[in-house]
Amino acid sequence: MANVDAVRLSNELGIDLAQAMLRLRREGIPGETKRQTCLRIIADEAHHRRPGARH
């Protein structure tokens, strides 16, 4: 069964659930909860997708 954070990440980024689960696992920082990782990924993606955003 998928966790809530993977489902949220999947919905927010428009990726499938398996990709979201892998991304949470891969991009997590030691000591960071899955919820924190999820929110950080969403924020990073929103920053990169915003028109005129600097990289």
Image (spheres, rainbow, N blue to C red):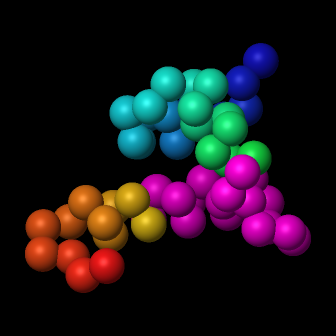
Classify residue 55 by image quadrant: bottom left
For image coordinates 24% across by 81% down, the residue present is 54
Give the farthest residue toward the left.
Answer: 52
- Judge whether residue 10 can be spotted in this image: yes
For image coordinates 25% across by 60% down, the residue present is 49
Where's the N terminus, which quadrant? top right
For image coordinates 46% across by 57% down, the residue present is 42
Left or right placement of residue 52 versus residue 30 in this view:
left
Residue 20 is situated, as x and y percent measured from the top left of the image, at 58, 36
State the residue in front, 43 or 28.
28
For image coordinates 72% across by 51% down, the residue present is 26
Residue 28 is situated, as x and y percent measured from the top left of the image, at 73, 59
State the residue in front, 27 or 6.
27
Residue 5 is situated, as x and y percent measured from the top left of the image, at 64, 42
Left or right placement of residue 19 versus residue 10 in this view:
right
Classify residue 23 by image quadrant: top right
Q: Which residues are magenta?
A: 26-43
Give the farthest residue toward the top.
Answer: 1
Residue 47 to residue 14: above or below:
below
- Predominant secondary structure in magenta? helix
